Image (cartoon, helix red, strand yellow):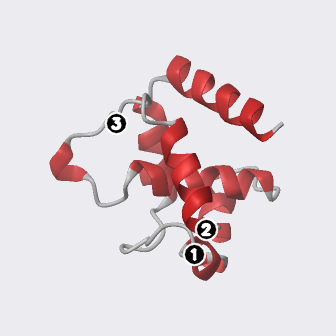
Amino acid sequence: MLAKTQKEFIDLFRDLEEPREDNKLLYPLDEILFLVISAVLSGAESWRNIVKYGKTKLSVLQQFFPYQNGIPSRFTIMRFFSILDKKRFELWLTLWANKLI
């Protein structure tokens, strides 16, 4: 079940372009997105709360993705979202939400 959920999540954002340079990928795209979406759906309302959620729920998150380097800092998450293509992310999020419905 977990592998299927993970595959479905990853398949949905294949078209979401990785905005970072390859040599700077300490935290993979899928891990950041899964962390942020999980945290927001659980009530997190700030970057700091997202990181706190991630650190608290790391063992749960690791059931879906490795999080080999742990949870990124709020500054890393903020930088990631500042360079992410917002229109593609909005489209991806809409497709994902529609698939859930």
Q: Which residue is mark 2?
A: 2
Amino acid type of the residue that numbered disc 2 sits on in the rendered structure: Leu
Query: Residue beneath label 3, please?
Result: 18
Point 48% across, 68% down: residue: 71
Which residue bears the numbered disc 1? 63
Dot 3 crowding, Cα within 10 Å, few <14, some 14–19, many 20+? some
Q: Quadrant of the N terminus?
A: bottom right
Pointer 2 or 3: first along the chain: 2
Of residues 56 and 97, the one drawn nearer to the viewer in this rendering: 97
In the picture provided, is 16 more to the left or to the right than 90? left
Name the foreground residue: 79 vs 84: 84
Residue 17 % position (x, y): 37, 30
Query: Which is more N-terminal, label 2 or label 1?
Result: 2
* Residue 87 percent location from the top left of the image: 54, 17
Amino acid at dot 1: Gln
In this view, 14 is above or below 46: above
